[in-house]
Each structure stands twice: as C-alpha cells, then as structure tokens.
Amino acid sequence: MAHASDTIYALSSGALPAGIAVVRISGSNAETILADLSGRSVEPRVARLLTLKDPIGETLDRALTLFFPEGASFTGEPVVELHLHGGKAVLRAVLDAIGAYPRTRPAEAGEFTRRAFINGRMDLTAAEGVADLISAETEAQRRFAIRNAGGQQDALYSNWRSRLIEARALIEADLDFADEADVPGSVADTVLDQVHALSSTIEEHLRHARSGEILRDGFRVVIVGEPNVGKSSLLNALARRDVAIVSDEAGTTRDLIEVALDLGGYKVVLTDTAGLRETDNKVERIGIERAREAVQQADLVLQLYVAGTSRPEQLDGERPSVFVATKADLLRNQAGADFLISVSSNQGIAELLSAIQVRVQAEAGGSSVLPSRDRHIHHLRETVDALRRAEVPDLALELCAEELRIAADHLGHITGVIGVDDLLDVVFSRFCIGK
Ligand SMILES: Nc1nc2c(c(=O)[nH]1)N(C=O)[C@@H](CNc1ccc(C(=O)N[C@@H](CCC(=O)O)C(=O)O)cc1)CN2
Ligand SMILES: Nc1nc2c(ncn2[C@@H]2O[C@H](COP(=O)(O)OP(=O)(O)OP(=O)(O)O)[C@@H](O)[C@H]2O)c(=O)[nH]1
Ligand SMILES: [Mg+2]
C-alpha cells in the first residue's frame, strides 16, 4: 500500500470518450490543486464553472468543479471533483497536470472508499455494499447492496456486538463481587439467558446465508442430460441468444457454458454442460467431470431427456432437481416429467422460466439483512461456536467471559472495528479504480 498521506486522484466515471468525465482528488493537496489550476479561490460545496489552465497558462478544459472540505466529504478528506469534457486527450492532460503536484499520485483500486472506511465514514460491510452496488446488474442485487451500503448490516452486527460486550461486563462485575455477594452467579444466569437468545438469533441469521449469496452472486441453474437431448438448445432459448453451439452430433458441448439472466430482478446463472455418457475421449471426459462438479454447486438442476424415452436416474448428490422432457414437438404423450418443452415450437419454455423464477424468489428471500460473503459466514459461525461454549453449564465465569470476548471480536471483524489490516487489501483490491 502506497502512502496513506498522499493526495490521490482518478477518473471516477466510466469509459472514455464520454459526455462528461468526473475526476476525483482526495487528500491535503486537493484544494490547492483546484485553486492553482483555476486561478480562483475555492468555495466549499458550490458548483462552479471554471477554466482550468496548466502552469504555462494553456487552457486544459472548462469544467464544472466542486470542493468538499475535510470532514464533510465522501472520504472524510478534502475532496475536489472536476466534471470535464469526457475526451481521452482532455483526461490525459488534466490527469498529468494533477500528477505533477508533489505527494500526489493515481489512486489504487478502491482507495477512495478505503479512506472513507479508515476515516470512519462507513464500516467494512457498508464499503462492501458500495462495491456490490457498483457491480449490481439486477433490481434485487441493487436493493440488497443499497441496504448494506446504507449501514443496515453494520447496524445489526454492531448491535449484537454491543450486547455481547455488555453481557461480558456484567459477568466480570459479578466475578469481582462474587466473594461478598448475596446470591453468587444470579446475574450470570440472567446474562446467559440473554446470550442464549442472541446465539439462537445468529444461528437463524446464518441459516439464510445461502439466500444472501443467491442475491449477490446469482441462483445457479445447471442443465444436464445425455448427449443430444437439447441442453444447449434450451440454454440458447432461455438466454434468447446463440451462446452455445447446437448440432445433431452427440458430444457437441465439451466445456461449461454460463450465461447470466435477469429473472424478475433476480440474477440467475444458467450453465450448459457436456452430455453425460461413457466415453474414451479425453477432452469429453474432462467436460463430463466438470458437469458433475457444476451439479454439486447448483441451486437447481434441470435433468433433460428426450420426451418418449425413459426418464434418467436422479443424479447423485442432494441438489434439488426437476425432470425436463425435451423435443415435445416430436412426440405428444409423456409421463414422469415435471416440464415438457420444445425449443422448436417454444412449448413450455415460459412455464419453465417462471418456475425457476418462483424458486429464486423463495430462496433469495426478501428484505432482511443477510450474510453474503464467505468472511461474514466464517465469523458468524465462529461467533455462534464461542457463544455455545460460553453457554456450557457450570462453566467458570472467567472462561465464560473470555468466550463472550471471542464472540464479540468475531462480529467486530465483520464490521472492521477489530484487526483488519491484512483484510483491507483483499476487500478493496476488488473495487474498480476511481471508487
Ligand atoms: N459527483 C459525485 N456523485 C456521487 C458520489 C461522489 O463522490 N461524487 N458518490 C460517491 O460515492 C455517491 C454519493 N455519495 C456521497 C456520500 C457522501 C458525500 C459527502 O460529501 N458526505 C459528507 C457530507 C454529507 C452531507 O452533506 O450531507 C459527509 O458525510 O460528511 C458525497 C457523496 C454517488 N454520487
Ligand atoms: N425437433 C426438435 N429438435 C431439437 C429440439 N431441441 C434440440 N433439438 C435438436 O437436437 C439436436 C441436439 O441439440 P443440442 O442442443 O446440441 O443438444 P445437447 O444436449 O446440447 O447435446 P450435447 O452438447 O452433444 O450434449 C440438435 O440437432 C437440435 O436442433 C426441439 O425442441 N425439437
Ligand atoms: Mg450441447
């Protein structure tokens, strides 16, 4: 990590050329840079149209400018925004002029948000929410991200954490007065009841972990079946474009082919796979192995077979699956299928899609705060484990207090109030530059 005291700058808007491009500058030099480039004194939080000039007086651009003073900006540092004409040469010239100032350098990925976190403008889950908001492609992803970016996940975990800290304080107070106490341990009993209630709440919260991942990363639907049953044809029909090669040759698809769909605002990731059969072909065998692995990750497996042929065995593993009989245009009567479809006549495709949507809606859940990243789930599990240990009957109060401390610290890791130094690079490197 380069110097945290440097002034940083980056193009914060999208690809060039663009109608307008926004450059953000954050750090102690920001105000000077704007005053210098514009030759004007800087007024906080007022949009001004200024002519920016390089040191030899050549005009760089006429830009709309903003200045946010320290303590009242996105990062918490002095911030300047230049709303420029979005041409490549304009940006190159302006960024070069900014970079010429001492202790001023291009921002790293996520560095503005990282500074906002360091300066206490937001907790780590809100910063993750900002990243999720930027990558959100569907309405459900957007709603989920905006809640976390607005601090709802932080509020929930911080509340749990302060309850644990309070419980520990009460137990330690009980310990201190135990010798002189009237009814030793009585405070601890009440506290432990509260701890138990909280650990149940967190366990319940953890049970919805997959819902959070589905909202954020998408609901995984995997299409499997023997060669030539029409898997790739179905993928193309559901995606409404020619993603996968279709042919009457058995064994056409070798690798996994993924497409993301927006189903009623939910992200759904559809995977087409190699046809399952015994084969001596090396490449095809690898493809079949990948298909089996994809099934293990699926939220829903579509098991395809040609209508009128015998229904295949249920695949190994406990993944939810439905049987889809294909090529219905070639045959009428069909028993045993959950869905009867034809890509040629479009029969049953809309029904299959809406059935998938109903499942996603049911599994992604609604409006509550949900854990959505491995690190959330890990620390929540550790929290519950520590609380379970704290609840062991007749545990010495010293040990109980220590388990409560461990539990509270794990919640603190999630929001970033505890030991995050090594974590920050991981969290913020996934951001784009300029955020
Ligand atoms: N031009 C522009 N648009 C943007 C951003 C930005 O940085 N610049 N944002 C960047 O993500 C988002 C808006 N988020 C922001 C969050 C806080 C502050 C800010 O100045 N906060 C101060 C003052 C608060 C106030 O006036 O109410 C503060 O918190 O002290 C600015 C933008 C989306 N749109
Ligand atoms: N009549 C009819 N033919 C279909 C239908 N769906 C697929 N086909 C045909 O069946 C053949 C195989 O289709 P694919 O989609 O490539 O089958 P696949 O399951 O992906 O096959 P592999 O990739 O080899 O495992 C192609 O000739 C398709 O045109 C359908 O609904 N009706
Ligand atoms: Mg195929």
Image (spheres, rainbow, N blue to C red):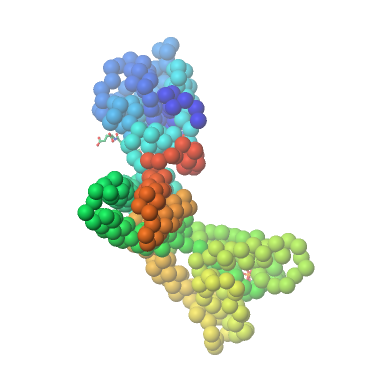
| x, y percent for residue 330 | 59, 82
Q: Residue furthest top?
A: 56
Residue 83 percent across, percent down from the top left: 36, 30
Q: Can you tell which quarter of the image residue 264 is in?
A: bottom left
Residue toward you, 301 or 260: 301
Quadrant of image for the C terminus: top left
Q: Is residue 333 above or below residue 241?
A: below
Residue nearer the viewer, 334 or 114: 114
* Residue 347 visible in this rendered orientation of the protein: no
Residue at 28% in and 50% down: 178
Residue 243, given in percent of the width and then of the height, sits at 58, 60
In the image, farthest residue toward the front: 179
Residue at 33 percent across and 15 percent down: it is: 39
Left or right, 226 with respect to 376, comes to right
Q: Specify the quadrant of the image occupied by residue 395.
A: bottom left
Q: Is residue 152 left or right of residue 353?
A: left
Which residue is depicted at the point 29% across and 26% down? 69
Q: What residue is drawn where x is 46% and y is 30%?
A: 107
How many tags in the picture? Answer: 0
Q: In this view, which residue lies farthest toward the right?
A: 280
